Amino acid sequence: MAGRHFRLFSATSSSTSSSLIITILSLLTLTSLYFLFISFFSSNCIIPNQTASLSPNPNPNSPPPQYSFVASLDKFLSSSSSVSSLSSQLAASPDSPEDLDDRIWKREAEMSWTDPSVVRVYVYDMPAKFTYDLLRMFRETYRETTNLTSNGSPVHRLIEQHSIDYWLWSDLIASESDRLLKNVIRVHRQEEADLFYIPFFTTISFFLMEKQQCKALYREALKWVTDQPAWQRSEGRDHILPVHHPWSFKSVRRFMKKAIWLLPDMDSTGNWYKPGHVWLEKDLILPYVANVDFCDARCVSETQPKRRTLLFFRGRLKRNAGGKIRSKLVEVLQDNEGVTIEEGSAGAAGKESAQTGMRRSIFCLSPAGDTPSSARLFDAIVSGCIPVIVSDELELPFEGILDYRKIALFVSSRDAVQPGWLVQFLKGISSDQIKEMQANLVKYSRHFLYSSPSQPLGPEDLTWRMIAGKLLNIKLHVRRSQRVVKESRSLCTCECRVGNNTKAAMS
């Protein structure tokens, strides 16, 4: 009995083990197939309900970012009422350029341990008439003004679009405990600085002051900066000058052409930024401040069924210089089905119309303005509307970090003005490519949203990352200029390059 029981148990056990092995193998196979499917799905499909974090915040206790220039400025000025000249309190300026150069040499000889990716910036403590007074002038006149530029654009809105000087400066001088950016630090001794920041609000002064008064202030700012030992040591090569509006500081900026200019573009027309004054190796392109609200992942998903317009544009239809292509585009596009072309400016009503139109459109036209750049490019990006860029000489912000081919289409002026060509081209873009580019727009938007406090991967952060890449070249030209015998060489440098010429597609 016992033996027979054993044989029965043994047979049963063998059968059970085989079944168990088969079951385990089946489960393993199914599990492998499941993970293969998930991997394929994640890499090739867009998950509609997936929302990208706007900006990773290393300090969870910090206040939520403020993206409104006016609201941020109100808070900044109210908290800055007791601001004192911190820089001048901590350390007096060196007596001479030679004295400063000697201090810098000693510091550099001991800095092999420092992190080269961290940019050290000395912020000039300029008189209030160049800084706080101009910010207060903007705030006090913002709500009641109806001033318009010659082309009908509201003055204060133009200032907001070019307010990069405010966002960078307010972050640099903020309390270290309130700052989130770690790749740039403010130093209070000039010999510790890699770069010097000039906090002069050139755009506000241009638009809100009388012409002669403004020019006088420009001359005062020029003298104040060029009298500094640090400027005289390097002839301004390691100084950062925000001149983001092409009209700002125009009467005197030729005397500061060796500084690092913060620009909206390189202006290939030569009407605003002159050849020999600007070039990519020295200067930096920064995005305009968007005129419309950010459309996040949920917004893009919710507006997707409403995007029935193929191509949308709202703005000034007649521009100067390179922007003359706008009128030619209107001629070939205005009667096409699925295309909306509207005349308009950047006021409150204009913002609402532009925002609504962009959120109902798949593609947004971004032609050249008076200069190769246009604020509409950045409005389109934060609206989830794929930009169609028609600007042959355009230089883009942070190109070297960002690949714009993932979020925008680039069309030559010659092709775009051919009747019927652009519409047929856009209709040929596959739905899969459109979805992929719209998903990328959500991810890229964070790089174009100025905020307070400045966010990691935001435009302020990318600005300093780009400048960090220029530092060695800046130091090279500073040292070279100090030792080269004047007029001893006839070598062509960046300073004598001929600027780009706008193509003749519009002629």
Image (cartoon, grey):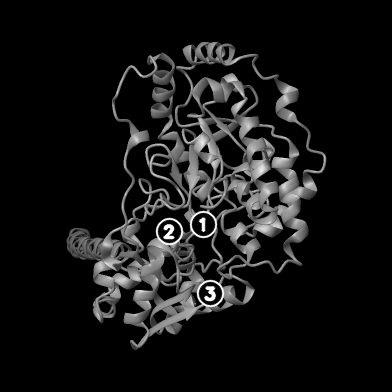
Residue under the point 76% across and 51% down: 136
Name the quadrant of the N terminus. Answer: bottom left
Do the CB atoms of the residues marked 2 and 1 lie less than 8 Å apart?
yes
Residue at mark 2 to residue at mark 3: CA–CA distance: 19 Å
In-front residue for pair 263/278: 278
- Is label 2 or label 1 in front? 2
- Judging from the image, what secondary structure is the residue with disc 3 in? helix
The amino acid type found where label 3 is placed reads Gln
Q: Position of residue 287 (x, y in %)?
A: 48, 54
Q: Which residue is mark 1?
A: 288
Which residue type carries mark 1?
Tyr
- Label 2 or label 3, whichever lies nearer to me, is 2
Return the mark for residue 355: 3
Residue ranking furthest to the front: 212
* Mark 2 lies on residue: 373
Amino acid type at mark 2: Ser
Q: Position of residue 488 (x, y in %)?
A: 33, 16
Of marks 3 and 1, the one in the foreground: 1
Residue 324 appears in view: yes
**Which residue does the image show at 33% across and 67% down from the upper left?**
436
User: For the image shown, how many numbered marks are present on the structure?
Assistant: 3
The earlier-in-sequence mark between 2 and 1 is 1
Labels 2 & 3 near each other (Cβ < 8 A): no
